[in-house]
């Protein structure tokens, strides 16, 4: 799993939890299969932009909320 995926996964998990949704329910509402979201959350499959946009819409958050912190990840990679 990439650092980018970890960052998005953490943000997504937090937003799902804040709304008292299960990961499976969030997946269905966003038009994904529960297994598909599970594989993305575990890093087995990378997220597509369209999937993140759908999840942001379902969760009622700006897309930027799901990718918050990616600049810091890029800065860490650049410094290494």
Image (cartoon, rainbow, N blue to C red):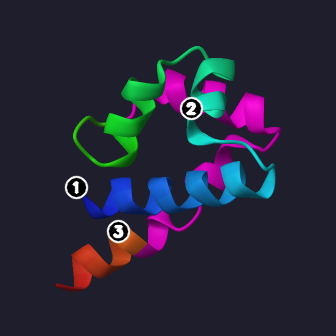
Answer whether residue 17 is magenta in the image.
Answer: no
CB within 8 Å, label 1 to label 2: no
Give the CA distance from mark 1 to mark 2: 21 Å
Query: Do tag 1 and tag 3 residues touch (Cβ < 8 Å)?
Result: no
Q: Earlier in the sequence, mark 3 or mark 2?
A: 2
Position above or below: 29 against 18 = above
> Residue sitting at 51 percent across and 18 percent down?
32
- The single residue placed furthest to the bottom in the displayed view is 79
Q: Which residue was labeled with disc 1?
A: 1
Question: Of callouts 1 and 3, which one flags the residue occurring earlier in the amino acid sequence?
Answer: 1
Q: Residue furthest left?
A: 80
Check disc 1: other Cα within 10 Å, few if <14, some if 14-19, many if 20+: few
Tell me which numbered mark, 1 or 2, is placed earlier along the sequence: 1
Q: Depth check: 4 or 71 in front?
A: 4
Mark 2 surroundings within 10 Å by alpha-carbon count, few (fewer than 14), some (14 through 19), many (20 or more):
some
- Distance from disc 1 to disc 3, alpha carbons, whole Å, reads 15 Å
Q: Which mark is residue 24?
A: 2
For image coordinates 35% across by 68% down, the residue present is 74
Main secondary structure found in the magenta portion: helix
Position of residue 20 measured from the top left corner of the image (x, y, whole percent): 78, 50
- Which stretch is magenta? 47-72
Circle 3 residue: 74
Q: Which residue appears at 68% of the width and 49% of the height?
A: 16
Of labels 1 and 3, the one closer to you: 1
Q: Is residue 70 above or below residue 47?
A: below
Which residue is depicted at the point 22% across and 55% down? 1
Indicate the secondary structure of the residue bearing disc 3: helix
Whether residue 55 appears in magenta in the rendering, the answer is yes
């Amino acid at each position: 799993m990439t650092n980018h995926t970890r960052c998005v996964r953490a943000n997504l998990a937090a937003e799902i939890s804040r709304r008292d949704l299960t990961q499976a329910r969030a997946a269905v509402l966003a038009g994904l299969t529960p297994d598909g979201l599970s594989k993305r959350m575990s890093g087995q499959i990378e997220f597509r932009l369209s999937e993140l946009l759908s999840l942001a819409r379902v969760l009622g958050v700006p897309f930027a909320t799901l990718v918050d912190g990616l600049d810091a990840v890029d800065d860490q990679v650049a410094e290494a």
